[in-house]
Image: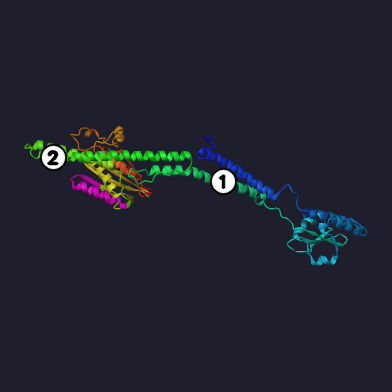
Amino acid sequence: MKWPGFLNLRGIGGQIAALVVVSIVALHTIITAAFLFHRPDQPGPPNDVGPSQLTTIARLLGTAAASDRPRLMTEIVRAFPHLDVQDVSPAAAAAGVSEAPRLRGMRRHLGADYRIVSLDQGDGSRRIGIVLPDGAMISALMATDRLSPPIWGSPWMVTLLFAVISVTTLGLWAARTLTAPLSSFAKAAETFSLDGHAALLPERGPEEVRALAKALNRMRQRIVDLMTDRTRMLAAISHDLRTPITRMRLRCEFIEDEVQRGRMLADLDQMRSMLESVLSFLRNGRKLEAMTLIDVASTLQLVADQFIDMGHKVAYAGPDHAMATARPDDLLRCITNIVENAVRFGTDVVIRLTVAPDSLAIDVEDDGPGLSDADKTDMLEPFARGDRARNMDDATGFGLGLSIAQTIARAHGGTLSLRDRDPHGLVVRIQLPTRQHSLRPAA
């Protein structure tokens, strides 16, 4: 039997409906418990009206004639036994505390002709004395005054606060339980890698979330298998082609015409270089190099020196030292690929480093013909070459240098962009963070 969505507790709809029901039940339970404990419908204890009754008795005795007081006292004792009203000698007033602060309310109601003293300082019920206008004195028991609690300390306010806190806590717990798998999905997407070391998505939570996690894990496995098969196939092709290329190179040595022999050897070298470049591009990102703290400025100076040794005009401009967290070999390869493109199309190349508190920018500037705005986006795609490299007979590039550099920059959490140089030329800018919060895959 298939339950409706709001009754299926394994689904998100059912869990939200259950949360609403549980919150309502919990709120009503708390309010009911508070009502049963405090019982506002029940009258308070008799002593709650003691001060008003005692005030009435004192005024009655104070206005009555002295001959009528014994009879009135008898009736009062019979009618109000809880007050324990007694005649007291006026001399007892000297032992009491006159005009006790807690008795000033009664004093205002009785008037200036009456005087009230406290005869007992106990924590429970206490005895007070009232001196009548003619000097006679009576005493009575009166419960300890009940001070009205502040509004935030009243039972109903405490109950309301407890209910709000309880329901809010329940809601936050439920929200975290429902959204935790989604957060893990986002984290897994950020750290997705084809190297096989990333952990699978946790298959927990509501039914819909578990189904989504299973589907994403299967999709990830299919992508990994597809990329593995593609790389394995191209690796096999590259390996198989090396043997005939090597045989052809050996046979070229028997060609007597030096011009033809040189051209054939150049073509064979180009074929071998193409196979290695394609295979390197496909394998990029499969095995991540460990992040470490390196001196980026020294790496850029090393690249500039290498190209200077090869006869190119490459200069470095920037600070002597700039520390950042990166993959050393990947960063060296990235800058080398960019500078190779720059020296191919330009004669004067500058590697410029700019350091900010949380990031650094690497600009590789050349004085070549540059690129149009339409070509800037296409040049970052694999196997895309500039107008001067459309013909494989005229250029040795395969259109993978900038694509590999962009992949490495993204693996470091950075970006690669192409900009125009004034008055002519191209600027390849790499923006990288100096600190890495998490490892990002290169593919």
Image-based side of 28 in relation to 330, left or right: right
What label does residue 327 carry, if any? Answer: none
What residue range appears in magenta? 293-315
Q: Is residue 400 above or below residue 90?
A: above
Question: Is label 1 in a helix, a strand or a loop?
Answer: helix
Q: With respect to residue 183, does 373 lie above or below?
A: above
- Looking at the rendered structure, the kind of residue marked 2 is Arg
**Camera-nearest residue between 354 and 103:** 103
Left or right: 43 as drawn, with respect to 6 = right
Q: Is residue 305 magenta?
A: yes
**SS majority, magenta:** helix
Q: CA distance from mark 1 to mark 2?
A: 77 Å
State which quadrant residue 53 falls in. bottom right
Q: Amino acid at mark 1?
A: Thr
Where is residue 355 drawn, in percent x and y?
34, 49
Q: Which mark is residue 247?
A: 2
Mark 2 burial class by Cα count in 10 Å: few <14, some 14-19, many 20+: few
1 or 2: tag closer to the N-terminus: 1
Q: Is residue 393 left or right of residue 408?
A: left
Q: Residue 168 bears which disc, if any?
A: 1
Where in the figure is residue 204, as x and y percent of width and height?
Answer: 46, 44
Which quarter of the figure has residue 99?
bottom right
Judged left or right of residue 353, residue 138 is right
Image depth: mark 1 or mark 2 in front: 2
Q: Is residue 427 visible?
A: no
